[in-house]
Amino acid sequence: MIEIDLKRLLKKQVVGERIFLSLSFLALIVVLSSLIVLIIDVIADGHSRLSLQFLTGFPSRKPEEAGILVPLVGSIYMIILTGLFALPLGIGAAIYLEAYAPKNWFSSLVELNIANLAAVPSIIYGLLGLELFVRMMGLGRSLIAGALTMALLLQPVIIIVSREAIRSIPISIWEASFALGATRWQTIRHQILPLAMPGIMTGAILSFSRAIGETAPLITMGALTYIAFLPDGIFSPFTVLPIQIFNWVSRPQKGFMVNAAAGIIILLIILILLNSLAVWLRNKFQRRLNW
Amino acid sequence: MVDKIAFEIKDLNTWFGETQVLKKITLTIPRNHITSIIGPSGCGKSTFIRSINRINDTIPGFRLSGSVVFEGMDIYDKRVDPIEIRFKIGMVFQKPNPFPKSIYDNVAYGPRIRGIRDRVLLDKIVEESIQKAALWIEVKDKLAKNALSLSGGQQQRLCIARALAVNPEVLLLDEPCSALDPISTGKIEELLLDLKQQYTIIVVTHNMQQAARISDFTGYFLLGELIEFGDTARIFTIPKDKRTEDYITGRYG
């Protein structure tokens, strides 16, 4: 009697298992196929324009002569500058919150606000950047103003991932270091940060790849202008890949559509490279944390 | 019975938040002997030993009253820097906690944070410390290997070597063998008996046989109170307190 019930139960479970498996597989297919459709569509449209001339060409009124060099260099400068501002600030804030801040209402308030800031639409950061960096600090529509705006935008995310990475280091490592007479800073500097760094970098790179694709804050800042030369310093005006793509898409000529598609391919390649770097770091990290 | 005193602890009370963990602990710990602290789980043994090098200070909500006088200096005096205390009082934890770095870097970490950069001197300190911890023969050819590749017993001896590398006066051990097999335990016990010539050793243990085997003095803690303290041989043969007797004869609870 009991055995029969058990068999029926098992059968029911197997059916449930199959349904769940198919549903989750379906979800994966939907996500993947839309991505594949996007990629195929873009490659079909843009592959004919992919050439060295396109990569090294300057903007032009003729689509077949226009190149992507200026926004490509702009994007690379932008991400490096953003990293220079965002990483030390974000990691520093995370260290303060994790290792020094007293646990009181003030730190809870800060914590809540950081979580909120992470969800603020990026266009709001663009407005802030426009007012604070472009106008008040008089930096103009320069690379540095753009990078500072992007750094602000990434700040909450970097703080959150850095805190997670620091928190994942077991308390026993802190105590081992303290017991040897190390100060808090020595412990962080020599034990905690080296262990947390891969985790921090994984999160940071993922947030950078988001920043590379961000357009709204830079457009709000006023970076949507025709730039025909490479930036010659951090105070130089600039443009970036997504803005160039946006610009080309809004042109009536068919040739610029092809250029936009080719630009998207370049942007996707950069994103894939960055994300692979993040995955590689994460795998390395997991292996090392095996204690 | 006691010629030289390492610690004089008086009316030590500790709290975590609102919970009082230790209640009016008063005892004297002699120098160059092994003192063991025994008692059931949750009796405050670990809190007690962790109060001696002020590592409890790092836990939010920890408070303390009373005094812990080490070689004539109250370590909880406002003018005393806890870092200085931990220079002199080393600690080994229950679960071996080597840094996920090389064996060499584990032992060299303490000297390095004290500013020793000279490679020859560091080499010498590392070798001597690992030798003192009776681990040298096993690791001398793989100092550059990650410490986590060692067995649990080796890791614990490495942690002892790491603590010895900064030349402390006292070694605190918080249940150092509870995660180890009997052979590793035996090695660590032998090691502690050797080390007591040079160091004052305080060891918290769950294992009464261990306390009886290695320690000169024993304190029995129960529910945050020190029930009895004295010569190990006497505590284990003619305990004065009924509760101590119940515990050591296995009739506790």
Image (cartoon, rainbow, N blue to C red):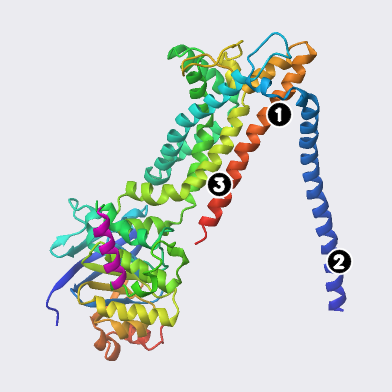
Q: Can you say whether A172 is above or below B230 in the image?
A: above
Q: Which amino acid does label 3 sit on?
A: Leu
Badge 2 sits on which subunit?
A
The numbered mark, 2 or 1, whose residue comes first in the sequence reads 2
Q: Can you say whether B222 is above or below A105 in the image?
A: below
* Chain part drawn in magenta: B118-131
Q: What count of labels does the image hold?
A: 3
Kindly state the secondary structure of the residue where label 3 is placed. helix
- Residue B149 is situated, as x and y percent measured from the top left of the image, at 47, 66
Quarter assignment of residue A50: top right
Q: Nearer the viewer, mark 3 or mark 2?
A: 3
Which residue lies most toward the front here? A52
Q: What residue type is labelled 1?
A: Ile
**Residue where numbered disc 1 is placed:** A265
Residue A120 appears in the figure: yes
| Residue B245 falls left or right of residue A2 | left
Q: Which of marks 1 and 3 is in front?
A: 1
Q: Which of B179 and B49 is in front in this view?
A: B179
**Residue where numbered disc 2 is placed:** A11
- Residue A198 is situated, as x and y percent measured from the top left of the image, at 51, 46
Q: Are marks 3 and 2 on the same chain?
A: yes
- Residue B227 is situated, as x and y percent measured from the top left of the image, at 29, 77
Residue found 31% across the figure and 74% down from its top: B203
Most common SS among magenta residues: helix
| Residue A259 falls left or right of residue A86 | right
Check residue A281 in the rendering and tell me which mark sits there, or answer none.
3
Q: Distance between the residues labelled 2 and 1?
A: 48 Å
On-image quarter of the N terminus of chain A: bottom right
Q: Distance between the residues labelled 3 and 2?
A: 43 Å
Kindly state the secondary structure of the residue where label 2 is placed. helix
Q: How far apart are marks 1 and 3 (CA)?
A: 24 Å
